Amino acid sequence: MDIRQEQCPLDSRPRGAALAVTLVAALWVLAACSAGPTRSHSSPQPRTSGTSGTSGTSGTSGTSGTSDASAPPRSSPAWLLTRSAASQLIADPAVRAKLQGALVYEILRPRQQRLVGITAKPVVTFASATALEDAVTGGRLPAGTYGVLYDPEAWSFTPVAEQRDPVQAATRAAAVAHAHGLRLIVAPALNLTTVLAPGRQQPRWRAFLDLNLVARLAAVADIVEIQAQSLERDTAAYTAFVRAATSQASAANPRVIMLAGLSTNPPGAPVDGQQLTAAIRATRSMVDGYWLNIPGQGPRCPTCNPPRPDIAIQILQSLP
């Protein structure tokens, strides 16, 4: 660090006093430099070599250094939103203005076009690493795609082989994504424990942590999303899980961007805006942002309650 100090005239005070003041000032500056933030809130760079950073061979763009440098400061959380959720949120003028001042990742399904009316980094989602690889290498992503999201879960949309070894699948996905100048987001579901650690009697989130899965995925991914939404009714449990998972990930990859999951209408008892806001306030210093999900009822969430965009709007309106 370049430490610059104003110098007083030599004859204005005794040499001993000048040296003492200089020494104290230097020590103060060094102490200030040694204190760092709890997490870095910068956009990730793909960990690869030999790529230009301007466009991938699949015809995608949006990975240039200028796009990351122009991102707003991360004083507010980053938001990972599906196209459907984003369209419902920007219908509220105040929320639309707030999202325009934040970093937003817009999740698109394959062949889905990005939403008009919001500035966001488009991310195409896949539940299968094989499907992700095929889409990227086949040049089937929309122009301007920022990254790809791999969402392995214990469900019919993720191949059984990938459920049994999601780290190996994510490693393949990362290699393909980075070779084409794309970021990789990995969002492992807690229900993977039913495949990887069947018969465990402990809570699912504790079994998930025991597998050290977050750390192993963070070692290859640019962004990891912790699917913590099933714990959002219990702020203490939500916080404990996010803290432990983030610690695992940061130890494996200090540069990884961490997001935590929230849902306005998860399966089970209904939730309210106060519960989700409490979860955010308890974990804001631990993560870079949140996947704020407003799931629709369907094959991917057959037991979800009816969508509640009003809860998401309430949350965003209440945050600074």
Image (spheres, grey):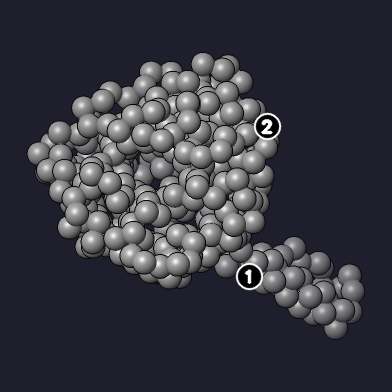
Q: Residue furthest right?
A: 13
Q: Which residue is nearer to you in this view: 320 or 217?
A: 217
Q: Is residue 162 above or below residue 318?
A: below
Residue 215 located left or right of residue 58? right
Whole-percent x, y for residue 45 in the image: 35, 52
- For label 1, the residue is 34
Q: Label 2: few (<14), some or many (≥20) within 10 Å?
A: few
Q: Is residue 25 above or below residue 286?
A: below
- For label 2, the residue is 318
**SS for callout 1:** helix
Task: Identify the image quadrant of residue 56.
Answer: top left
Q: Is residue 286 above or below residue 156?
A: below
Can the viewer see residue 123? yes
For image coordinates 34% across by 59% down, the residue present is 194
Quadrant in the picture for the N terminus: bottom right
Q: Label 1: few (<14), some or many (≥20) within 10 Å?
A: few
Quadrant in the picture for the C terminus: top right
Amino acid type for the residue under numbered disc 1: Ser
**SS for callout 2:** helix
Whole-percent x, y for residue 199 in the image: 36, 66
For image coordinates 76% across by 66% down, the residue present is 7
